Image (spheres, rainbow, N blue to C red):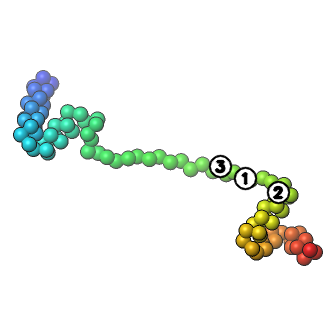
Amino acid sequence: MAEAREQARQKALAGIRAAGEAGDWRALEAFLRMSFPADYRRDASVNVNAIATGQQTAIVCDEAMRARLIALREQVTGRRALPATSADAEEAQAQ
């Protein structure tokens, strides 16, 4: 049974190839698809698996660096930032 199936497949491929050589591009496309299924698959679906992790990074800096960053932001934007804490608000009023 397997041998008969293989002979039928070879005969069909030969017919498709002959039609392709006669100028039918569809036959050539079918020949390629059937002869090289791994390279010419019609199933072009792409499966993407993404796993979101709960990993977060935190930027840590000391108070001196924080103050410099705030001052730089104020220079760039031309406006004062709102105080982040009540202690910052009291410090800003004292100045």
**Circle count:** 3
Picture coordinates of residue 51, whole percent (x, y) = 53, 47
Can residue 57 be seen at all in this image of the molecule? yes
Q: Are marks 3 and 1 in contact (CB under 8 Å)?
A: no
Kind of element beneath mark 2: helix
- Residue receiving disc 2: 65
User: Cα distance, mark 3 to mark 2?
Assistant: 25 Å
- Residue 57's place in the image compared with 9, above or below, is below
Picture coordinates of residue 85, whole percent (x, y) = 83, 69
Q: Nearer the viewer, residue 47 or 26?
A: 26
User: Cα distance, mark 1 to mark 2?
Assistant: 15 Å
Say left or right for 22 vs 70. Answer: left
The three-letter code of the residue at mark 3 reads: Gln
Can residue 1 be seen at all in this image of the molecule? no
Q: Residue at x 78, y 53 (%)?
A: 60
Picture coordinates of residue 83, whole percent (x, y) = 81, 71
Which circle's residue, 3 or 2, is located before the other in the chain?
3
The three-letter code of the residue at mark 2 reads: Met
Q: Residue at x 86, y 58 (%)?
A: 64
Kind of element beneath mark 1: loop
- Residue receiving disc 1: 58
Picture coordinates of residue 26, whole percent (x, y) = 14, 45
User: Cα distance, mark 3 to mark 1?
Assistant: 10 Å
- Residue 90's place in the image compared with 45, above or below, is below
Q: Please rate how many residues cluster around mark 2, counting C-alpha atoms within 10 Å: few if below 14, some from 14 to 19, many from 20.
A: few
Say left or right for 18 vs 43. Answer: left
The three-letter code of the residue at mark 1 reads: Ala
Disc number for residue 55: 3
Which circle's residue, 1 or 2, is located before the other in the chain?
1
